[in-house]
């Protein structure tokens, strides 16, 4: 009986966490987007995440690349920027994700890499010069992380905020086991950024999933 009760409590907590995470991600998928969606040429910026020491992509990176492939078709994007530097002796995040994108069938002519950024703030900052000729910009990651990138763009280059569009990154229960810790991390990041006067915001490292 004690085991059954503990199991039921654990299941209730898990279901509650998943439900709260889904609500947050769904809501975040709509944050910081202009009321009137822009039209014209579109570029995607895929936010980096550390590559495994072996050089293989982790589950978070695969999710982001697969979301980018979906967004490419949905938005008719003409450029996909994979952003992220090498860290701790690992292959560059942008290069590793770009290689996977090609394996999925994304044409090489549509792919660009940015291999200097080591934080989300820098993902945005270093990708902006590649976006000059585009009317629409979509950040690709989980919905909460993508919303943070949109917020950073508005802080860095407010005149570009009207170009933001959604990558269509929210799907109910998609990778829910990754969304739950991502939601916890992004809530902590939001708390830190609101209680710091530093720019870039404190703790703006990518998600340690």
Image (cartoon, rainbow, N blue to C red):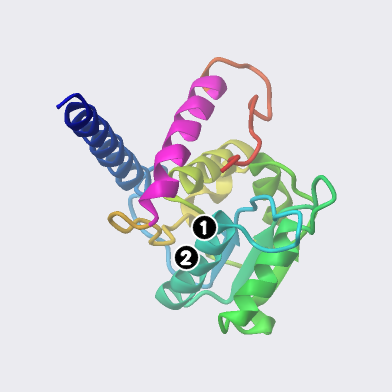
Q: Which residue is mark 2?
A: 67
Q: Which mark is residue 37?
A: none
Q: Which residues are magenta?
A: 175-193
Q: Residue furthest front?
A: 1
Name the element at disc 2.
helix
Residue at position x 71%, y 44% from top?
A: 122
Above or below for 208 versus 123: above
Between the residue at mark 2 and the residue at mark 1, the CA separation in whole angstroms equals: 7 Å
Mark 2 surroundings: few (<14), some (14-19) or many (≥20) residues within 10 A: some
Whether residue 33 is visible here, answered yes or no, is no
Q: Residues within 10 Å of mark 1 (few under 14, many from 20)?
A: many
Residue sitting at x 65%, y 53%: 48
Is 8 a magenta residue? no
Horizontal and vertical percent for residue 155? Answer: 58, 36
How far across and down, in percent of the image, does residue 1 sit? 14, 27
Give the SS element for disc 1: strand
In the picture as drawn, the residue positioned furthest to the left comes out as 1
CB atoms at circles 2 and 1 under 8 Å apart? yes
Out of 62 and 78, give the one closest to the viewer: 62
Quarter of image, res 23 = top left
N-terminal of the pair, mark 2 or mark 1, is: 2
In the rendered image, residue 132, in percent from the top left (x then y), is placed at 66, 62
Residue for badge 1? 140
Quadrant housing residue 120: top right
């Amino acid at each position: 009986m004690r085991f059954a009760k503990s199991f039921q409590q654990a299941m209730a907590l898990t279901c509650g966490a998943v439900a709260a995470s889904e609500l947050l991600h769904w809501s975040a998928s709509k944050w910081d987007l202009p009321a009137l969606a822009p039209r014209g040429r579109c570029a995607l910026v895929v936010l980096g995440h550390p590559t495994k020491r072996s050089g293989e992509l982790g589950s978070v990176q695969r999710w982001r690349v697969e979301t980018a492939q979906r967004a490419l078709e949905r938005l008719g994007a003409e450029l996909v920027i994979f952003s992220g530097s090498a860290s701790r002796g690992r292959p560059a995040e942008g290069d590793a994700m770009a290689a996977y994108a090609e394996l999925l069938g994304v044409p090489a002519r549509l792919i660009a890499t940015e291999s200097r950024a080591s934080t989300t703030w820098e993902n945005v900052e270093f990708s902006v010069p590649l976006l000059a000729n585009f009317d629409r910009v979509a950040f690709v990651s989980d919905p909460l992380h993508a919303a943070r990138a949109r917020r950073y763009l508005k802080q860095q280059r407010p005149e570009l905020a009207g170009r933001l569009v959604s990558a269509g990154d929210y799907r109910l229960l998609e990778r829910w086991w990754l969304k739950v810790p991502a939601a916890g991390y992004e809530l902590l990041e939001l708390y830190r950024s609101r209680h710091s006067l530093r720019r870039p915001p404190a703790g703006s490292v990518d998600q340690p999933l």
